Image (cartoon, grey):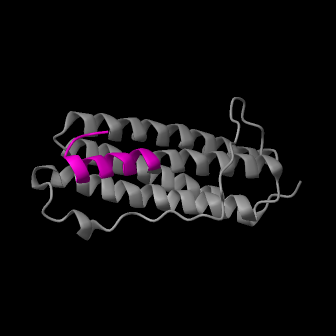
């Protein structure tokens, strides 16, 4: 199978998104004071490393073997790839929980990171003809959607009650 320039580009961009996501989460975890928030951010950072390794493996497969490969243990669930994610409006939280401002800012930025990654995987899945490529991009989109939902739950909990979900 001929290596698709689009697939190589999509994977290269995905690799950068995961590397940037990891760097963001580690840096954000270092800056926040709340231990629960710190643990959540570090957990998300570790997930980004797993995603990075998966993407690197697929890049290698495309370069060496000429196509995507099956990744054992990865089953793509149902993800509505037509749906976009939208981070919440930061103005809505102004003045409500001043003592958690840095945590809320970190979560808002993290929502943007996850939204960008999800959008990339969603579009890549729809553009990829290779079934294993579609499965990988769908799985990654689902993982980023899960991250987005975790972050959104905590954002809403802090915004409404000033506590962690």
Residue shown at 89% from the left, 53% from the top: 1
Q: Does the magenta stretch include residue 71?
A: no
Residue 127 occupies quadrant: bottom right
Tell me: 14 left or right of 19.
right
Q: Which residue lies furthest to the top in this view?
A: 73
Q: In this view, does 68 lie to the left or right of 120?
A: right
Q: What stretch is highlighted in magenta?
A: 149-165
The answer, for residue 23, to whether it is visible in the render is no
Query: Is the stretch drawn in magenta largely helix, strand or loop?
Result: helix
Q: How many labels does the image show?
A: 0
- The residue at the point 62 percent across, 57 percent down is 121
Residue 91 placement (x, y as % from top left)? 24, 70
User: Does residue 100 appear in the picture of this structure?
Assistant: yes
Q: Which of 159 and 38 is in front in this view?
A: 159
Residue 160 within the segment the image draws in magenta? yes
**Above-or-below relation of 58 to 88:** above
The one nearer the camera, 58 or 103, is: 103
Provide residue 4's location: percent of width, then percent of height. 78, 62
Image point 42% across, 57% down: which residue? Answer: 113
Quadrant where the C terminus lies?
Answer: top left
Front one among 83 and 31: 83
Most extreme residue toward the left is: 99
Picture coordinates of residue 17, whole percent (x, y): 50, 56
Question: On the image, which quarter does residue 128 sit in?
Answer: bottom right
């Amino acid at each position: 199978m001929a290596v698709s320039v689009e697939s190589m580009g999509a994977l290269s961009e995905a690799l950068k998104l995961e590397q940037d996501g990891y760097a963001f989460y580690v840096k954000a975890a270092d800056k926040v004071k709340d231990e629960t928030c710190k643990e959540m951010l570090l957990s998300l950072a570790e997930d980004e490393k797993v995603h990075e390794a998966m993407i690197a493996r697929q890049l290698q497969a495309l370069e060496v073997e000429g196509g995507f490969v099956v990744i054992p243990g990865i089953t793509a669930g149902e993800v509505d790839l037509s749906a976009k994610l939208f981070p919440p409006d930061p103005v809505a939280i102004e003045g409500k929980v001043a003592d958690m401002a840095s945590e809320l800012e970190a979560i808002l930025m993290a929502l943007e990171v996850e939204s960008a990654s999800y959008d990339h995987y969603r579009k890549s899945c729809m553009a990829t003809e290779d079934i294993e490529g579609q499965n990988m991009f769908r799985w990654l989109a689902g993982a980023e959607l899960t991250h987005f939902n975790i972050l959104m739950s905590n954002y809403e909990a802090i915004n409404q009650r000033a506590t962690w979900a």
